[in-house]
Amino acid sequence: MNMIHTEAYRTAFSAYLRKGTPIPLSLKQAGTTARYVWRCQGDHFVRPAHRANDGRVFAWDNPPDTCHPGEDYNCRCAADPYILGETEFALHEYTSDFPSGPVRCGNREFVSHYYFADGRAVTLGHVDKWRSQRRIDVMSM
């Protein structure tokens, strides 16, 4: 989406990048929509609370408990304008029978799947199965 910002907003954004001063809410709302879609970077540096907000729609005048994207210290999250019927967003809830933990799927499982699965796609079910097998292997040591 192309965004057209006012000169005041650009100046405030520049100050934010240089000094970390928050952008006033009035400048954020000027020329934008009333709602936004929270977008996080999706890497391992993202705070759990910010990851939970990813893909959700919020109003500028009613921020979530975590504040608006980019307002927290070192936050790299962004707010994409939300236009009803035009903006694509997704609120994904991933569920698993296994709690998150130190057990991770490694290259062994993915390479094995590549060679022995006849080109079938990897699903979350495969990953859960691999994680449970790894968990059993780790516990039996």
Image (spheres, helix red, strand yellow):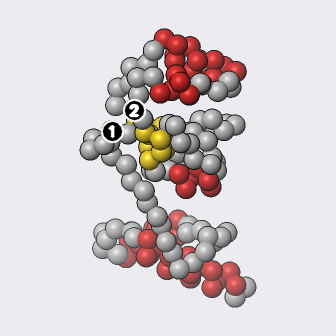
Identity, as a three-letter code, of the amino acid under mark 2 = Thr
For disc 2, the neighbor class at 10 Å (few under 14, some 14 to 19, many from 20) is some
Question: Compared with residue 26, is residue 45 higher up or lower down, i.e. above or below?
Answer: below
Question: Compared with residue 80, is residue 31 higher up or lower down, i.e. above or below?
Answer: above
Nearest the camera: 133 or 14?
14
Identity, as a three-letter code, of the amino acid under mark 1 = Ile
Asked if residue 129 shows in the view, the reply is yes
Residue beneath label 1, please? 83
Nearest the camera: 136 or 72?
72
Question: Compared with residue 18, is residue 131 higher up or lower down, i.e. above or below?
Answer: below
Q: Please give the name of the residue rendered at 57% of the width and 21% of the height, measured from the top-left corner.
A: 13
Asked if residue 112 shows in the view, the reply is no
Residue 106 — which label?
A: none
Q: Could you tell whether 83 is left or right of 103 in the image? A: left
**Residue 114 coordinates in the image, percent (x, y):** 39, 69
Element under label 1?
loop
**Is the C-beta separation of discs 2 and 1 under 8 Å?**
yes
Nearest the camera: 112 or 124?
124
Question: Compared with residue 28, is residue 64 higher up or lower down, i.e. above or below?
Answer: below
Question: For the view shown, which residue lies furthest in the bottom direction?
Answer: 140
Question: For the view shown, which residue lies furthest in the front direction?
Answer: 61
Residue beneath label 2, please? 33
For disc 1, the neighbor class at 10 Å (few under 14, some 14 to 19, many from 20) is some
| Mark pair 2, 1: CA separation | 7 Å
